[in-house]
Amino acid sequence: MRILFLGDIVGEPGRKTVRKLVPRLRAQLGVDVVIANGENMAGGAGITAKTAAEVFEAGVDVITGGDHMWDQKEIMAYLPADPRILRPLNYPPGAPGQGAFLLQKPSMAPLVVLNALGRVFLPPLDNPFHVVPAEVRRWRASTPLLFLDFHAEATSEKIALARLLDGQVSAVIGTHTHVQTADEQILPGGTAYLTDAGFTGAHASVLGREIEPVIKGFLTNLPQRFPVATAQPRLQGALIEVDQATGRARSIRRINEPMPEPNP
């Protein structure tokens, strides 16, 4: 099984990049499943029904979230209606939606996609080091194929959770910082790992936002609006190949694809 994971989709430039590149990458790389972090895809913050539909139509199978899940009010009602959109599973009971989804396709074994939020420099949710292993144990009774998007700030927290889960899940891929790391590896137990997948959107930017307002904010310490940038769009993420019988990862490589230049 080949899983293509996309780092955080940022705004309309990110969605356009997904529409343009995902169909090509699916065919070119023999991709079976596409998972994308979409917590920033609606105007740079949150998810709406419209933006989710746009990404699904482009070939994404499952959308994961993070700390900006709730930035668009309509998600509160929409999230429970579409189980393909995940919010971190360590939100307290009663939060709309779910943190895991069982993806089933005729051509492949069942795959469970999980989403969790770190706690270092982020909201103090339930401890992912308690919640995630319990959820993994529950799902492993059904399938050995489990994929975790761990949306977290601290590198140490991401690595530690991946080490804890090594051999129990097929992959742990980090999101949130929007900076793609160069530490892709297969851990000893067979779990593919990458600290951060990067982001899909405009890279002539500061993490997907226009450069000058961010600089001005640092210079003045005054509130600024940070519009979504548009220049040099690029798709970042990772391609993971997994043995369907055992759930062990065979390979992982970073993906860093520029949007093709328009024809003159």
Image: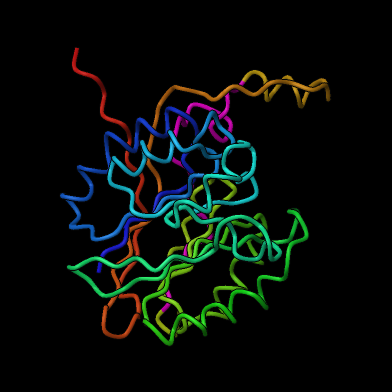
Q: Residue at x 34, y 38 (%)?
A: 18
The x and y percentages for residue 203 are 47, 31
Question: What residue span does the magenta drawing correspond to?
Answer: 191-211
Q: How many marks?
A: 0
Locate residue 96: give its quadrant: bottom right
Q: Quadrant of the C terminus?
A: top left
Locate residue 125: give its quadrant: bottom right
| Vertical comparison of 40 with 150: above or below | above
Of the pair 206 and 183, the residue shown nearer to us? 206
Q: Residue at x 39, y 69 (%)?
A: 102
| Vertical comparison of 5 with 99: above or below | above
Q: Main secondary structure of the magenta part?
A: loop
Q: Quadrant of the N terminus?
A: bottom left
Extreme residue in the top direction: 264
| Vertical comparison of 119 with 236: above or below | below
Q: Residue at x 34, y 34 (%)?
A: 17
Q: Is residue 20 magenta?
A: no
Extreme residue in the right direction: 221
The x and y percentages for residue 23 are 22, 43
